[in-house]
Amino acid sequence: MDNQKRFLLTEKEIPTHWYNIVADMKNKPLPMMNPQTKKPLTLDDMTGVFCKACSEQELNTTDAWIEIPEEVRNLYKNYRSTPLVRAYGLEKALGTPAHIYFKNESVSPIGSHKLNSALAQAYYCKQEGVTNITTETGAGQWGAALSYAAKAFGLELAVFMVKISFEQKPYRRSIMQTFGAQVVASPSMSTKAGRKILTETPNYQGSLGTAISEAVELAMQTPNCKYVLGSVLNHVTLHQTVIGLEAEKQMEMAGEYPDIVIGCFGGGSNFGGICFPFMRHNILDGKTTRFIAAEPASCPKLTKGKFHYDFGDEAGYTPLIPMFTLGHNFSPANIHAGGLRYHGAGSIVSQLLKDGMMEAADVKQLDTFKAATIFAQAEGIIPAPESSHAICVAIQEALKAKEEGKQKTILFNLSGHGLIDMSAYDMYLRGDLKNYEVSDSEIDSNLSGLDKIINL
């Protein structure tokens, strides 16, 4: 099959179960904590904000395989399996002996991997009798996915969209509204958390931490309403493992196994979705695949953050999560990869990084757009700015293989297309984009108050 480019599964081969890596981890993640009691989070604590099924999945540390409901699988069939593609064009452009593959999640109805969890969470909310849901969105991919899923299951949805993305990506806002969602620029005057932030910093352009605070607050104040999250938490990453489980079968069809697996990193669901099914073979079977999380240099929680309990949002409404963090009040630079502008990492990824099971690389904005352009010209797909971080690291690893004269097999997740991000490409092509980096002193200053929250 050396000359085959695209690998697809039959409908019967689409996974019937998600993979819960926590069950196989030698060192389990530390428990999330109730910020009031400073005790491990209980199911009752979680169901005050999240639906019961997702809360049970979040706390499940024993079952490696969790069945995908038939209704969700039927909706998956509309776009799954997604193609595994051998990037012959990119290999040729780089002159590398490496074999490069990418899982193309951009072919979903809304153009990204986010639909995999949106459909699951909307289904569980509907089964529980919930009528209204709230969420946050950075670049708008999650908001678009959940808008589609909410309409599919007859739910009313309110989306708090990070203000800078609300302004930078108007068409993603239009997609959400087309599917019937209410979209509010965050921070807003419609919540206590938003009003406080705007009073203190009137021109604040927002962050995912702020948008989460507003969405959680609205969910807690609205009858028959639950909050639905797009990344970070364990159950979201669980739903995304359908990506890696498919890729496993498809790599087998290609007659190869990855030496390196790469995913861009915001909160961890996309990275975990492609990596965790392969990582189980490192844990259980002694495989030595490398796993690399590609994050922005402007928001480097994995490479420069501190492992500590911290809030998942700015206002302190969420549980305390054991995570690599830059501090929940960190204000990320206004890069165009809005989905990666988040201060912390999920508890699973944070534990795996502590244990040396994975690596992290921080990437500058201009380097990601250069990589995206190379990829687009070689493969004919314009990638999302978020996905371009993974592409950049994949190119770096392919060039290392060239220097070493080694044949390596590299797999990355193309988590979404960039066709609604062309204003960012326009700025790059005009030379108007710039790099943002965070100084060590700025990070240290921002992290200085964490010990007041809870000591590890």
Image (spheres, rainbow, N blue to C red):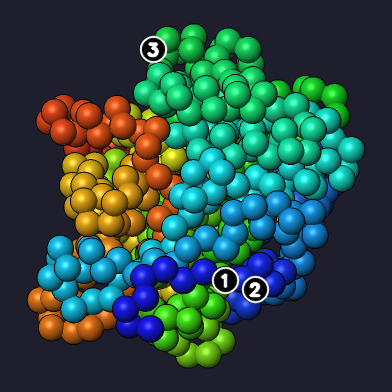
Mark 3, residue position: 203
In the image, taking residue 355 as reference, residue 188 lies left or right, namely right
Q: x, y percentage for residue 389?
A: 31, 51
Report whether residue 27 is seen.
Answer: no
Q: Are marks 3 and 1 in contact (CB under 8 Å)?
A: no
Depth check, front residue: 200 or 425: 425
Q: CA distance from mark 1 to mark 2?
A: 6 Å
Classify mark 2: helix, strand or loop: helix
Nearer to us: label 3 or label 1: 1
Badge 2 density bin: few <14, some 14–19, many ≥20, Cα 10 Å: few
Q: CA distance from mark 2 to mark 3?
A: 50 Å
Q: Quadrant of residue 58?
A: bottom right
* Residue type marked 1: Leu
Mark 1, residue position: 9
Classify mark 3: helix, strand or loop: loop
Classify mark 1: helix, strand or loop: loop
Please name the residue shown 52% across and 60% down the image: 82
Mark 2, residue position: 13
Q: x, y percentage for residue 316?
A: 60, 33
Q: Are marks 1 and 2 in contact (CB under 8 Å)?
A: yes
Depth check, front residue: 223 or 110: 110
* Residue type marked 2: Glu
Please name the residue shown 51% across and 18% down the image: 185
Please name the residue shown 36% across and 70% down the image: 5
Report whether residue 11 is seen.
Answer: yes
Q: Is residue 303 above or below residue 278?
A: above
Earlier in the chain: of badge 2 and badge 3, it is: 2
